[in-house]
Image: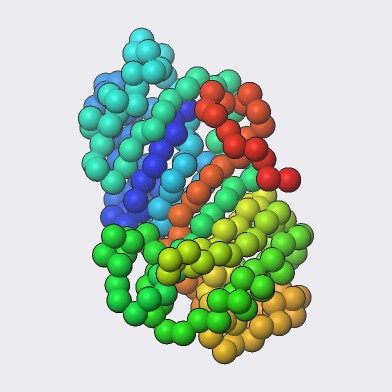
């Protein structure tokens, strides 16, 4: 299994698409160059177009004699600068990076000052208009718990259930950067971006009754979908010992 980090701005998400470059396709190209075969690559999440990942896990089968500890450097040689292999380890054949994940953490970052920050522009949404920071921070935890997030799902998703559990949803501001951090057992299509957009709308004069918006299950009650480039998949949690990577403590 690979531990990846990538900037998603140049890609139409992780999963392979017919007419657009994706992270999965690019990593498979590198694997093919290295292994002289193109193994299937299974990812831990279907990140959307333009979304980034700080820690992303993807597994592939191989009988290559290349020692696992040498794979990261060898793959990085064949990868563009916006994708990096941080590590590699062996996992059980039955392991699935997506279905065996216990929880995932996303961060949505909003740059608040009037002037653009060129060093943060790729990975944060610039919102120079006044924001009630206290309201944003106060309202974020209201998303915690088990809810039907039907009203926070973008069109185009297809799932059997829209019920999800959010273990932690907190916001903090530091030196002009407002960060929303949300951890849950799973997320609907565009869900985190809609949560961020709803909180931002509430903190700029919009509806602040988060629980009522949730209970309505109406997409029209929630806020706009925040731009993709502000979102980063921050961490994926697995049971201890499942992978060879060092894991932070599961947050529940």
Q: Residue 230: horizontal and vertical position, in percent?
A: 42, 63
Closer-to-camera residue (7/250): 250
Q: Residue 131: horizontal and vertical position, in percent?
A: 50, 81
Q: Quarter of the image for the C terminus: give it.
A: top right
For image coordinates 50% across by 20% down, the residue present is 90
In the displayed structure, 90 sits above or below 210; it is above
Tell me if 161 is positioned left or right of 195 in this view: right
For image coordinates 71% across by 82% down, the residue present is 209
Q: Residue 182: horizontal and vertical position, in percent?
A: 60, 58
Tell me if 66 is positioned left or right of 104 in this view: left
> For the view shown, which residue lies furthest in the front direction?
175
Res. 246 in view:
yes
Q: Residue 93: horizontal and vertical position, in percent?
A: 56, 21
- Residue 218 picture quarter: bottom right
Tell me if 126 is positioned left or right of 197 in this view: left
In the displayed structure, 61 sits above or below 133; it is above
For image coordinates 63% across by 53% down, the residue present is 183
Tell me if 210 is positioned left or right of 129 in this view: right
For image coordinates 56% across by 64% down, the residue present is 172
Q: How is the image coloured?
A: rainbow
Closer-to-camera residue (6/161): 6
In the displayed structure, 142 sits above or below 204; it is above
Res. 198 in view:
no
Closer-to-camera residue (246/114): 114
């Amino acid at each position: 299994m690979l531990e990846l980090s990538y900037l998603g701005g140049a890609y139409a998400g992780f999963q392979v698409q017919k007419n657009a470059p994706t992270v999965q396709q690019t990593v498979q190209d590198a694997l093919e160059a290295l292994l002289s075969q193109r193994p299937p690559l299974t990812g831990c999440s279907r990140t959307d177009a333009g979304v980034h990942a700080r820690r992303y896990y993807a597994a592939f089968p191989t009988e290559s004699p290349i020692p696992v500890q040498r794979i990261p450097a060898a793959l990085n040689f064949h990868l563009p600068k916006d994708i990096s292999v941080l590590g590699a380890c062996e996992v059980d054949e039955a392991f699935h990076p997506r279905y065996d994940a216990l929880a995932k953490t996303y961060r949505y970052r909003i740059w608040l000052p009037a002037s653009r920050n060129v060093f943060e522009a790729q990975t944060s949404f610039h919102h120079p208009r006044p924001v009630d920071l206290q309201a944003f921070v106060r309202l974020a935890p209201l998303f915690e718990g088990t809810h039907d997030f039907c009203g926070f799902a973008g069109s185009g998703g297809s799932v059997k259930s829209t019920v999800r559990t959010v273990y932690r949803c907190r916001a903090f501001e530091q030196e002009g950067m407002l960060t929303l951090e949300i951890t849950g057992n799973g997320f609907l299509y565009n869900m985190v971006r809609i949560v961020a957009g709803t909180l931002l709308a509430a903190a700029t004069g919009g509806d602040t009754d988060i629980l009522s918006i949730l209970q309505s299950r109406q997409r029209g009650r929630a806020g706009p979908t925040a731009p993709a480039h502000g979102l980063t998949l921050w961490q994926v949690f697995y049971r201890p010992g499942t992978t060879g990577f060092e894991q932070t403590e599961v947050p529940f």
